[in-house]
Image: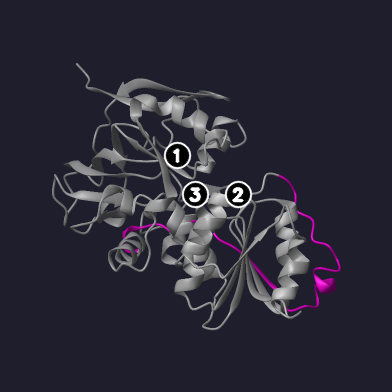
Amino acid sequence: MTAKMKAAIFVEPNRIVLDEKPIPDVGPLDALVRITTTTICGTDIHILKGEYPVARGLTIGHEPVGIIEKLGSAVEGYREGQRVIAGAITPSGHSNACLCGCLSQDGPRMKYGFKPMGGWRFGNTIDGAQAEYLLVPDAMANLSPIPDGLSDEQVLMCPDIMSTGFSGAESGRIRIGDTVAVFAQGPIGLCATAGAKLMGATKIITVDSVPSRMEISRRMGADHVIDFSKADVVDEIMRLTDGRGVDVAIEALGRQETFEAALRVLRPGGTLSSLGVYSKDLTIPLDAFLAGLGDHTIVTTLCPGGKERMRRLMDVIASGRLDTRPLVTHRFTLDQIEEAYDLFGHQRDGVLKVAITP
């Protein structure tokens, strides 16, 4: 008789339900991980609403923390019973994209190029982490042991939120002494703020309107927090920079108005680092773009993955330089996953991130 597990399954738009499905078989390069903690991402809400297409019957979720239950016959350097995480992006390590240094774009070849976000497999092209067990492909490229002394919740943001937020700061190439603006202080924006601080920015300006997020933003490193419901954000940032503008603007929401505002506050030669997932065409205003003559850089980034990225992020946590536990505001069991989706999807009760424990 095939062993079963509980899993959060996409049924159709607006329906993700808890049901049973077989525990996956383990191939030679795979690892079966028993999930101890996972979470819900904003991208999962796009899937729930039918705004991002995935196959019906797919297990959702891409932020796993767990224990190795079984190793594939060819996997070396790990042991069963070891606590591990895997990134939301799971590169093979040997594709053209990986060998070019772009691990996140490790996707299948299409008729005209490659599928964007191909390195994102969990809860996208293969079964994901909101389940009792998760099959991790290419385990030796993706499993990263959790350092002794770190709890599940301390490392829960590493697979996606922390990696994505930090990448916004890294792609912006922030330098010591830079002035940085971060638009939106959801979990990713908050990690972008923390990343900007770690990279040496000395004036960090963040934008939001939710009081609890504005408070955490200050704890993450913001020097000035602007409530966009009470002030003209562009005018206020230009005032705070004495009309100079910012060296780097990080867009962490995925909307036309925040993208445009980020462009408008850049100094000539500045960088707009875009992390948002956009659901509509973007328009670049002629004046904000300085007619294409402003020496601006616009760069996009998908969450970096792989075991080395995870090791580095966990080392940041272990060093005490950043504590992401305040981002976990609510806790549910896997049996309560539908309730957790309802809370997170409607952004009630000041939710930032939820911890899901099978």
C-alpha span from label 1 to label 3:
20 Å
Tell me residue 178's x, y (percent).
Answer: 58, 80
Would you say residue 90 is visible in this rendering?
no
Q: Which residue is mark 3?
A: 118
Mark 1 or mark 3: which comes first in sequence?
1
Give the magenta part as a residue range. Answer: 280-308
- Tell me the residue that label 2 is attached to: 210
Disc 3 secondary structure class: loop
**Frontmost residue, 212 versus 149:** 212
Label 2: few (<14), some or many (≥20) within 10 Å?
A: some
From the viewer's perspective, is the residue at label 1 or at label 2 nearer? 2
User: Residue 320 shows which numbered tag?
Assistant: none
Task: State how the image is colored.
Answer: one colour
In front: label 3 or label 2:
2
- Element at badge 1? loop
The residue singled out by tag 1 in the image is 40
Amino acid at pointer 3 = Gly
Q: Is residue 284 magenta?
A: yes
Distance between the Cα atoms at labels 3 and 2? 33 Å
